[in-house]
Each structure stands twice: as structure tokens, then as C-alpha cells.
Image (cartoon, rainbow, N blue to C red):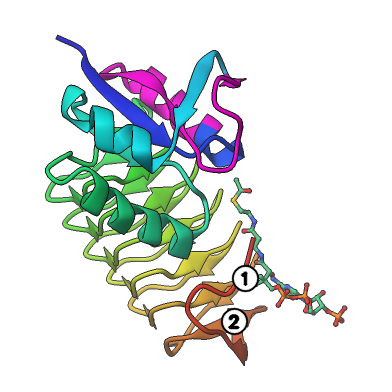
Amino acid sequence: MVKKIVLYGAGGHAKAVADTVEKQGVYAITGLLDDNRPIGSQVYGYEIMGGLDWLTRHGEELDGVIVAIGDNWTRAALAESIRKAAPGLPFATAIHPSAQLARGSVIGDGSVIMAGAAVGSDSRLGEHTVMYPLTSLDHDSRAGACTSFAPKAVTGGGVLIGDYTAIAIGATLAHSVSIGEHCVIGAGATVLGNIPSHTVAYGTPARPVRERSAGERYL
Ligand SMILES: CC(=O)SCCNC(=O)CCNC(=O)[C@H](O)C(C)(C)COP(=O)(O)OP(=O)(O)OC[C@H]1O[C@@H](n2cnc3c(N)ncnc32)[C@H](O)[C@@H]1OP(=O)(O)O
């Protein structure tokens, strides 16, 4: 039987998540939830049904939920609110059929792995992580919870990435580098050394540019 899920979010990122879920073919999307858009409006033919109140009333009818918000910190906060509003409702994981998951790789609940993304041997992704198209996290790497890889962001093997960190479009991380929590690695950066937590870094080679606090906007 097809499992029923809702996507929490209704913007551009939610469209990309919906496409991944549709292609995966494991879940049927009952509808979308969004606290800032009118109830009854539609995205891709899916109705916006409400917000957290809806989930409190209908959570038990569902098999799962995916937080479909692109910003890492907002996605984390919403996941926490959902846990409280609908305790026991699982976070579903969406994996595009063209994604490649190597032996020993582990994908955290609520994560979304889009078209052509690759997770290398024995690599682990935390909960609610997003890998956009053509990204790769190579062998023996760890990406924490609520991290994100924008299109064509790639890493070598043995890389560590802390919770909430965003790897921007086209960034490259050399093997064995360690990136802290709450970092943003800027578009097109080439990271050759470690980057401490709460840092915005970019350039080739990437250099820390400034500090950033948790939740500071980057998209
Ligand atoms: C499907 C999707 O859409 S997923 C999302 C895709 N988008 C991304 O991944 C992009 C995310 N954003 C970035 O990567 C940005 O580079 C950030 C957030 C890291 C940096 O942004 P800010 O700190 O706001 O930098 P700001 O725009 O103020 O620019 C400051 C200076 O740094 C330069 N700069 C900014 N980012 C970069 C970069 N990645 N590489 C080199 N130089 C940069 C700017 O050109 C500017 O230079 P100037 O002062 O000489 O004019």
C-alpha cells in the first residue's frame, strides 16, 4: 500500500522535494502545509491544507512528513515543532531513483537526496539533510543534522561537516577537511583546510570571511 505523507513547506524547495518524492514512487503526497500561504491554494496540484494545527488534528492519519524548507535553521526549528505537534509521526526520507547510495551509507530520517546525488561508501548523513542535484559526499564522510548541499557541491573522502552547515552551489571540499557547525561555505569555494564553527568562508582557496550566528540568513 502506498504510504501517505505531507510536505511542510510550499515554496521552490518544496517543489523540488515533491518531484523527488513523486519519482521515488514510495509515498503519495496528501497535500502541503504552510503557515504563511492561504489555505486552499495549490502548488503542483497539491492543496495547502493548513499548518501545525492541521498536523495536530490529522497526524495519526499519515505515515510521514518531510520538512520541505530550504533554510537549514528554519527546517530544524520546524522539525522540532512538528515533533511536539504530532508526536510519533515519522519523518519520511525521499531518495530520487537516480541518486547513488554506496554500501554502508546511512541517510538520516527526513532527508532528501535529489537527482544524480551520490553518497559514498560508509558515509553518514544526519536527519533533515538536503542533497540537491549532482552533489556528492564521498567515502567515509559525515554530514550532521540539517546540513545542505546546493547543486554541484562535492566533497572528497573522510570529510566532516557540522550540524546546520550549508555548502553552497558548486563548492568543492578537499578530502579529510573538517567544517564546523553553523557554517556557510560560499558558492564556488574550494576548501583545502579546516573551517571553524560559525564561519562564512569562500574563495579559492577558501578563507574565513566573517563569523555568523545560528539562524543568520544565507539564501
Ligand atoms: C536550488 C538552490 O537554489 S540552492 C541555493 C543556491 N545558492 C547558493 O548556494 C548561494 C549561497 N550564497 C553564497 O554562497 C554567498 O556567497 C554567501 C552567503 C556565502 C556570501 O554572501 P554575503 O556574505 O552576503 O556576501 P555579499 O553578497 O555581501 O558579498 C560581499 C563580497 O564578497 C564577494 N562574494 C560573495 N560571495 C562570494 C563567493 N562565494 N565567492 C567569492 N566572492 C564572494 C562579493 O562579490 C562581494 O564582493 P565586493 O565587496 O568586492 O563586491
Please say whether residue 99 is visible from this viewpoint: no
The reply to whether the magenta stretch includes residue 23 is: yes
Instruction: Name the residue: 46% across, 87% down.
Output: 195
- Highlighted magenta segment, given as a residue range: 15-43
126 in relation to 50, above or below: below
214 in relation to 94, above or below: below
Instruction: Name the residue: 55% across, 73% down.
Output: 185
Query: Which residue, given by chain and number where applicable, does mark 2 sit on?
Result: 201
Instruction: Name the residue: 54% across, 26% down.
Output: 39
| Residue 186 - label | 1
**Towards the viewer: 94 or 38:** 38
The quarter of the rendered structure image containing the N terminus is: top left
Left or right placement of residue 46 versus residue 4 in this view: right
| Percent position of residue 84, x then y | 23, 53
Tell whether label 2 touches label 1 (CB within 8 Å).
yes
Q: Amino acid at mark 1?
A: Gly
Circle 1 crowding by C-alpha within 10 Å: few under 14, some 14–19, many from 20: many
143 in relation to 16, above or below: below
204 in relation to 45, above or below: below
| Percent position of residue 37, x then y | 60, 36
